[in-house]
Amino acid sequence: MKYIIGIVGLFVVLALAWAASSDKKNIKYRPVLIMIVLQFIFGFILLNTDAGNFLIANIAAGFGLLLKCAGEGVNFVFGNMVNDNKYTFFISVLLPIVFISALIGILQHWKILPFIIKYVGLILSKINGMGQLESYNAVASVILGQSEVFISVKKQLAFLPDHRMYTLCASAMSTVSMSIVGAYMLMIKPEYVVTAIVLNLFGGFIISSIINPYTVKPEDDVLEVQLEKKQSFFEMLGEYIMDGFKVAMIVGAMLIGFVALIAMINGIFTWIIGISFQDTLGYIFSPFAFLMGVPWDEAIKAASVMATKLVSNEFVAMMSLSSGDFNFSDKTLAIVSVFLVSFANFSSIGIISGAVKGLNAEKGNVVARFGLKLLYGATLVSVLTATVVGLIV
C-alpha cells in the first residue's frame, strides 16, 4: 500500500508543477524522467551506505573551518556584542557573507570559479537539458548558500532574461548552504541532511524544467562576462568585500520585514479563528504529508512541522522536530526531516530578492515579482524529495 500511495504522491507533485507551467508544450520529459531515476538511485545509496554520507560530511567540515576563519574577523569587530553560548542570526549567519564574498572574488580573479562553471556545468547540463550556468548555479548554491551564490554570478546577472533568473533563484531556494549543514546535523540525523542535499539538487532541475521550460541557445549560454577594464587584485578584493557587506545588510532588512509580517498574520488568524496561520496550514497540508508517505494518524502533526518551516524557516521547524514532543515513527521522521532541509519558505523570497537587488536593482525587482511562484516551485522540490524518501525507507 505504501508504494501505491507514494507513486500517487509522485504523480500529484509532477501534476502540480505541470499545472503551473509557463509553457506546457515545450516541457522536456526525458531529462525529467532521468533525473527522477537518479533521485531514487542516490537516495537508496545514501540511506543504505556510508560512502556518500562520509563524503558530504567531510565537505561540510571543510566549510566549517572557513566559518571559523570568518568568525575571527566578525568577533574582532562585534565580539563584545555577543553573549557566550548565545546564537545571533546577524552575527553568525549574515556577517560571514563578507568573508565568503572575498573568497569568491579571489577564486574569480584567479579563474578558478570560471573553470568550475565550465566543466561542472557542462556535465550536469547534459543530464538536465538546461544551460551550463543553471547547472553551475545549482551546485554553487549548495556550497556557497542562497545569498552568496549570486555574488559568484554577479557579472552575468544583467544579461540574463527573466526565465533564466527564475531557474537560478529556484535552485538557490531549493537547496541549503554547506556552511550551516553542521548546525542541521545537531538537530536531525546527518543521513537525512545529506540525502536531502543531493536529492534537492536534482529536484530543483526537475520542477524548474516543468514549471519553467526553455531551451538555452549555445550563443546565449554565457559563463563569463568580460570586464570593461581589468582590475588589480586589491581593487577586485575591495569590490567583492563591499558587495558581500551590501548583500548581508539587505538580506537582514528583508528578514526583519518578512518575519514580522508572518508574526502579524499568525496573530490575526489566532484572533479571528482561534488557531495560528501555521496550524491552519498544518490541517490544509496534511493530505500532502499523507501522499509523501506519512501515516494518516501522524499526518496532521507532521504537516504542522512542515508548515512551520514554510511560514518561518527551517531552523524553527527543526528545533520543533528535535524537541521530542511528537514521537514520530522512523518513516515519518525521515520524511519530515528531508522536507525541512531547504530554504523554501516565505522569508527566502525576501532573502533572494534582496541579495539580487544588492547586486542589480532591476533584476532584484524581477525576482520579487515572481516570488510566490518561486516559493511554490521550491516547496514542490521539498515535497518531491520527501516523497522519494518515503518510497525508499
Image (cartoon, rainbow, N blue to C red):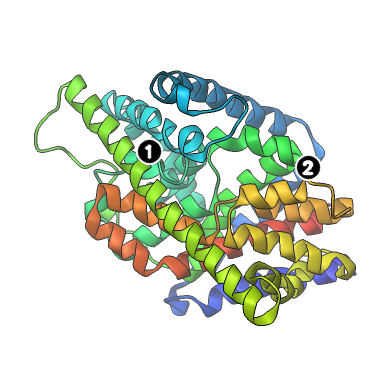
Count of number-bearing discs: 2
Please tell me whether mark 1 sits on a helix, a strand or a loop.
Answer: helix
Instruction: Identify whether 233 is placed above or below 197.
Output: above
Q: Give, as a three-letter code, the residue at label 2.
A: Leu
The reply, left or right, for residue 114 in relation to residue 338 is: left
Instruction: Identify whether 76 is placed above or below 326.
Output: above
Q: Residues within 10 Å of mark 2 (few under 14, many from 20)?
A: some
Q: Residues within 10 Å of mark 1 (few under 14, many from 20)?
A: many
**Residue 129 appearing in the image:** no
User: Which residue is labeled 2 in the image?
Assistant: 47
The reply, left or right, for residue 332 in relation to residue 120 is: right
Please tell me whether mark 2 sits on a helix, a strand or a loop.
Answer: helix
Q: Which disc, if any, is residue 260?
A: none
User: Which residue is labeled 1 in the image?
Assistant: 117
Q: Give, as a three-letter code, the residue at label 1.
A: Ile
Q: Residue at x 59, y 70 (%)?
A: 267
Q: Residue at x 62, y 71 (%)?
A: 14
Give the Cα separation between the discs numbered 2 and 1: 29 Å
Q: Which x, y percent locates residue 4?
A: 84, 71
Residue toward you, 269 or 369: 269
Instruction: Identify whether 50 is placed above or below 122.
Output: above
The reply, left or right, for residue 368 in relation to residue 392 is: left
Q: Which x, y percent locates residue 318?
A: 70, 48
